[in-house]
Amino acid sequence: MVSGAGTKVKRSEINDIVAQGHEFIRSFGVVLPPFAVWTPERMRRDDAALIRARGLGWDITDYGAGNFAEMGLFLFTTRNGSAAHLSEGCGMLYAEKVMISRRDQLSPMHRHVSKAEDIINKGGGDLIIELFASDPSGRIDRTADVTVMSDGCAVTVQAGGKLRLQPGQSVTLMPGDWHAFWAEREDCLIAEVSTVNDDKMDNIFEQPISRFAQVVEDVPATRLLVSDYA
């Protein structure tokens, strides 16, 4: 899957993924913020500047591999603080996302430099989290056990161990915790609550892949992605 890095995805496919994902989210009774339905023209207005600057909104990625069904993730960032607040240690230090992991769809192995996050299975199938610790250089440690917090309890797994989160369960991942995840049985609705999110700089992947999709503009966008804001 990684060998396809650099492959582009069509805007028409992204439009369909956004529409299907939004319907899936609503099926759980979750209502997204008003800007979820803003047109591209509305999102480009001056009063949406903070939304764009903070990277709020739709984020559909196939990690540049060109096969969203096998490797990808659906995200919608509902709120996000600022790096300035984080460095000062006060202010809006948090972020929140709604995500969808389709059945057997891989979100590939990665870690974060500064972000701590709670990954919460809000419904659907089981969410499988594969875990590794970091060695002193930040690379994957394939020998050390990993201990994470899951709903207030410490859980230890062997290197490469898999934590199964059923609906309602969660895991807390700290900076340096390598993780990959996918849904089993059914698609999963996921919530992410974290410290300030910086998807441009804070994702370290095991393989040389892209955080954002590369898009072919075969049709007009129905919704802008956060990667379109620049």
Image (spheres, helix red, strand yellow):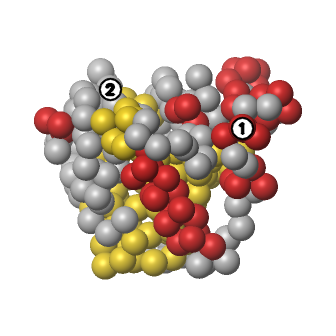
Query: Does residue 14 appear anywhere in the picture?
Result: yes
Q: Which residue is mark 1?
A: 41
Q: Position of residue 34 (x, y in %)?
A: 78, 55
Marks 1 and 2, how far apart at CA: 42 Å
Q: Residue at x 25, y 40 (%)?
A: 65
C-beta proximity under 8 Å, tags 1 and 2: no
> Which corner quadrant of the image does residue 203 belong to?
top left
Q: Residue furthest front?
A: 219
- Taking the image as shown, residue 10 lies to the left or right of residue 86, namely left
Label of residue 138 in the image:
2
- Vertical comparison of 163 with 206: above or below: below
- Vertical comparison of 165 with 139: above or below: below
Q: Position of residue 228 (x, y in %)?
A: 55, 31
Question: Which amino acid, by three-letter code, is at mark 1?
Answer: Glu
Q: Position of residue 171 (x, y in %)?
A: 48, 59
Q: Depth check: 70 or 15 in front?
A: 15
- Taking the image as shown, residue 89 lies to the left or right of residue 125, namely right
> Which corner quadrant of the image does residue 188 belong to?
bottom left
Question: Dot 1: within a 10 Å radius of its alpha carbon, few (fewer than 14), some, or many (20 or more) residues?
Answer: few
Query: Does residue 151 appear anywhere in the picture?
Result: no
Q: Depth check: 77 or 5 in front?
A: 5
- Vertical comparison of 157 with 50: above or below: below
